[in-house]
Amino acid sequence: MGARITQPIITGQSAIVTASTDISNDTGDWADIDSRSITLTTKGGNIYLNFCCSAQNSVNVQRGGFRLNIDGTPVATQINIFTPGSDPSIIDISYLKTDLAAGSHTFKAQWKDISGKLEIKDAKQGTTRHLLVIELPKNWS
């Protein structure tokens, strides 16, 4: 007789929001991407976040920032350098939050142009941007 599995391998929950339109940001301030968020009621434990898109500068932007927030608090920030007139670059930012308390939490992706105008060009590239949240089970390691 073979070994018995006494615990599920992976259980938990996940959510994703996607979009494929081109958008721009030239406010100089951190702004929600697409004004979208994910709210999950978690059991407490580890949470994996990921945001991915295609972005480029418009005219003279040299730097742009992307970050992930949990409940309004930035948890991961990435600054990208763009070459004027170049093709869109893939932006991929991930974060593992350990020991997040049980309860309702809101997750967001934000961006900021540092000078000029920053553009997400998913329609131009034929790509889809996403914000992904995965709650990992407490017993998963």
Image: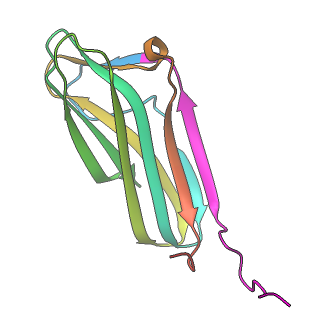
- Which residue is depicted at the point 53% across and 73% down? 44
Residue 18: in magenta span:
yes
**Residue 39 in view in this figure:** yes
- Which residue is depicted at the point 75% across and 86% down? 6
Q: Is residue 100 above or below residue 129?
A: below
Q: Nearer the viewer, residue 114 or 60?
A: 60
| x and y, in percent, of residue 18 in the image | 55, 32
- Count of numbered labels shown in the rendering: 0
Query: Residue placed farthest to the right in the image?
Result: 1
Query: Residue placed farthest to the bottom in the image?
Result: 1
| x and y, in percent, of residue 16 in the image | 58, 43
**Residue 37 in view in this figure:** no
Q: Is residue 82 above or below residue 45?
A: above
The range drawn in magenta is 1-22
Q: Is residue 122 above or below residue 5?
A: above
Residue 74: in magenta span:
no
Q: Nearer the viewer, residue 88 or 2?
A: 2
Quarter of the rendering occupied by the N terminus: bottom right
Image check: 61 left or right of 21? left
Q: Nearer the viewer, residue 122 or 35?
A: 122
Most frequent secondary structure within the magenta stretch? loop
| x and y, in percent, of residue 116 in the image | 16, 16
- Which residue is depicted at the point 53% across and 72% down? 102
Image check: 130 left or right of 89? right
* Image color mode: rainbow
Q: Nearer the viewer, residue 141 or 25?
A: 141
- Which residue is depicted at the point 45% across and 20% down? 122
